């Protein structure tokens, strides 16, 4: 009896120590969340760029390198999203396995769609659009790559990762259907949005909503009256139905455009980072639900 209760006590004490054994460092919050979904309690995930953070403009510090040195697994997006990552990995050294979450996705060019002015928005995205997670079907590839990375560094628990990944893949499949349903009611002629950051190319590709972003202006620059007038003219010419800012770009320009036109600025979309815990997009699935809901509501309403 005595021996049994000591054994039970030992089990209770040792169980929490097993959690978080695999140290994973991710570049940004979206792959951090996907990694937590697949890894469960086995993984301790740290994201270098935090909630609402801009991964394009991120400048790693020595503390970030130390996190990578100590990691078992590093997960990055790839497709040129984290221009700083290769150098950081070189500086950090260590023995972490590196997973590129987007490996194998059908990538699109940054300038692929007619109304995209990607190269001029102050970010250096390169030639490939890196924001592949904004299509849930492509994000399912992320899940598989992350699962395989976790299996490789923690093979004793490969079965756990496989099961958790399968369950999450089902969740994402349902989410993909749900987004299509949410957007189904949007009339064809109202499927065009002006946003502040050209991140939604994959969302456009997957869900048939077009996105324009302002041409020829860096995100920091204060636009002249003539530039704002040109943007208003362009928005009207392209029959933009809604102005929606995103969570990492200054929304002032959209507000200037709204002032000069008969439009209003709608709620914030989440593109390159999750919100903090108490925000509307603290997980990947909630982010995508939030975006679809905001878009549907903004486009369904009459101007
Ligand atoms: Zn971006």
Image (tube, rainbow, N blue to C red):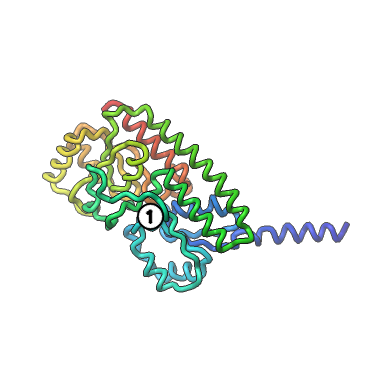
Residue 68, given in percent of the width and then of the height, sits at 47, 68
Instruction: Count the marks.
Output: 1
| Lateral position of residue 56 relative to residue 22, left or right | left
Q: Which residue is mark 1?
A: 53
Residue at image location 28% in from the left, 43% down from the top: 195
Mark 1: few, some, or many residues within 10 Å (few <14, many ≥20)?
some
* Relative height, residue 10 to residue 69 (above, below): above
Q: Is mark 1 within 8 Å of ligand 1?
A: no
Find residue 297 and report its horizontal and vertical position in percent.
36, 31
In the image shown, does 75 or 60 lie closer to the viewer?
Answer: 75
Quadrant housing residue 76: bottom left
- Quarter of the image for the N terminus: give it: bottom right
- Element type where label 1 sits in the image: loop
Q: Quadrant of the C terminus?
A: top left
Q: Compared to 253, does 178 lie above or below?
A: above
Task: Reply above or below: 250 against 10.
Answer: above
Q: Position of residue 251 (x, y in %)?
A: 28, 45
**At 22% from the left edge and 37% from the top edge, which residue is drawn?**
258
Give the quarter of the image for residue 122. bottom left
- Vertical comparison of 168 with 127: above or below: above
């Amino acid at each position: 009896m005595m021996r049994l209760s000591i054994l039970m006590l030992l089990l209770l004490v040792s169980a929490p120590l097993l959690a978080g054994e695999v140290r994973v460092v991710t570049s940004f919050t979206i792959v951090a969340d996907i990694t937590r979904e697949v890894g469960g309690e086995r993984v301790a995930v740290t994201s270098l760029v935090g909630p609402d953070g801009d991964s394009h403009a991120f400048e790693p510090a020595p503390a970030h390198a130390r996190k990578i040195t100590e990691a078992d697994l590093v997960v990055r997006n790839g497709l040129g999203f984290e221009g700083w990552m290769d150098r950081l990995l070189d500086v950090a050294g260590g023995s972490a396995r590196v997973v590129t979450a987007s490996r194998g996705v059908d990538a699109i060019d940054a300038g692929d769609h007619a109304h995209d002015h990607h190269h001029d928005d102050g970010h250096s995205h390169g030639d490939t659009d890196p924001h592949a997670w904004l299509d849930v079907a492509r994000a399912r590839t992320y899940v598989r790559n992350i699962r395989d990375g976790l299996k490789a560094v923690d093979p004793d628990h490969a079965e756990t990762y496989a099961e958790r990944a399968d369950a999450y893949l089902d969740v994402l499949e349902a989410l993909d259907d749900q987004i299509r349903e949410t957007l189904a009611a949007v009339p064809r002629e109202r499927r065009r949005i002006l946003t502040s950051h050209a991140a939604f190319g994959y969302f456009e590709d997957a869900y048939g909503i077009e996105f324009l972003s302002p041409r020829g202006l860096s995100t920091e620059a204060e636009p002249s009256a003539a530039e704002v007038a040109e943007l208003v003219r362009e928005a009207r010419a392209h029959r933009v139905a809604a102005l929606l800012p995103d969570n990492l770009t200054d929304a002032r320009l959209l507000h200037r455009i709204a002032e000069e036109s008969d439009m209003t600025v709608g709620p914030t979309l989440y593109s390159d980072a999750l919100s903090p815990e108490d925000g509307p997009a603290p997980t990947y699935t909630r982010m995508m639900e939030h975006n679809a809901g905001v878009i549907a509501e903004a486009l369904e309403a009459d101007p």
